[in-house]
Amino acid sequence: MSEFEIDIKKCLNTIEANGTILYPTDTVWGIGCDATNEAAVEKIYNLKQRSKEKSLIVLLAEARDIMQYVAAPPPDIIAIVENFDTPTTVIYDGAIGFADNAVNENGSIAIRVTNDPFCKALIKRLQRPLVSTSANITGHPTPAIYSMVDTTIINGVDYIVQHRQQDKTTRQPSRLVKIDDEGHITVLRP
């Protein structure tokens, strides 16, 4: 069995047991859990020392999955998301199916459809959205590579993915946008 497959299985076991994982994404290293599990989401807020008013990013494997988790997405959202040329997180109104503490108090949710093969495989096998918040204590630097992850985070998660730990390719956090009902995009973080 490959290291990739071992990591996927260990992540699934950890997530199914209400646990948290430290893993590489299509952007930076992230802390993740089942985005529909309130107790697991709470663990992430506590580990990051993050205010509950600041909601978390959630990853989906495919653009069509947005339809399952957003009450009224723009009609052409799948085409819009599939045409992004850089990792982009979109804030949607009307989040449905998530843990209450994963959703912003105004009912919105930040979703990124990942292109990362590891994340895609994990989410497809989990069959639920995956929390993906940067693997840092709130206010501390965002870890672009594994060696930059703070020991507090390393010691605080339930499983650490081995895949890509030696990868020194630095990546930036995702672009953050809001899309209105007409499909107009407002960039909140370039």
Image (spheres, grey):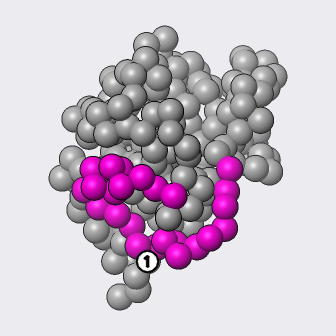
Amino acid type of the residue tagged 1 in the rendering: Phe
Residue at position x 41%, y 86% in the image: 2
Is residue 162 on the magenta stretch? Answer: yes
Residue at position x 49%, y 11% in the image: 106
Please determine whether, in this image, residue 1 is positioned above or below residue 59. Answer: below
Please determine whether, in this image, residue 121 is positioned above or below residue 128. Answer: below
Please determine whether, in this image, residue 156 is positioned above or below residue 163. Answer: above
Is residue 25 on the magenta stretch? Answer: no
Q: Nearer the viewer, residue 153 or 123?
A: 153
Is residue 49 left or right of 149 when viewed as pictured?
left
Asked where in the image residue 6 lies, by quadrant, the reply is bottom left
Query: Where is residue 145 drawn, in percent x and y?
Result: 56, 62
Q: Which residue is mark 1?
A: 4
Q: Nearer the viewer, residue 37 or 148?
A: 148
Q: Which residues are magenta?
A: 148-172
Query: Where is residue 190 drawn, in percent x and y?
Result: 77, 35
Please determine whether, in this image, residue 60 is positioned above or below residue 48. Answer: below
- Residue, far left: 17
Residue at position x 53%, y 76% in the image: 166
> Could one spot residue 12 in this view of the protein?
no
- Residue, far top: 106
Residue at position x 66%, y 61% in the image: 170
Q: Nearer the viewer, residue 76 or 28?
A: 28
Q: Nearer the viewer, residue 41 or 126?
A: 41
Query: Where is residue 10 drawn, in percent x and y?
Result: 28, 68
Magenta stretch, main secondary structure class = loop
Q: Quadrant of the N terminus?
A: bottom left
Is residue 2 left or right of 65 when viewed as pictured?
left
> Could one spot residue 90 in this view of the protein?
yes
- Residue, far bottom: 1
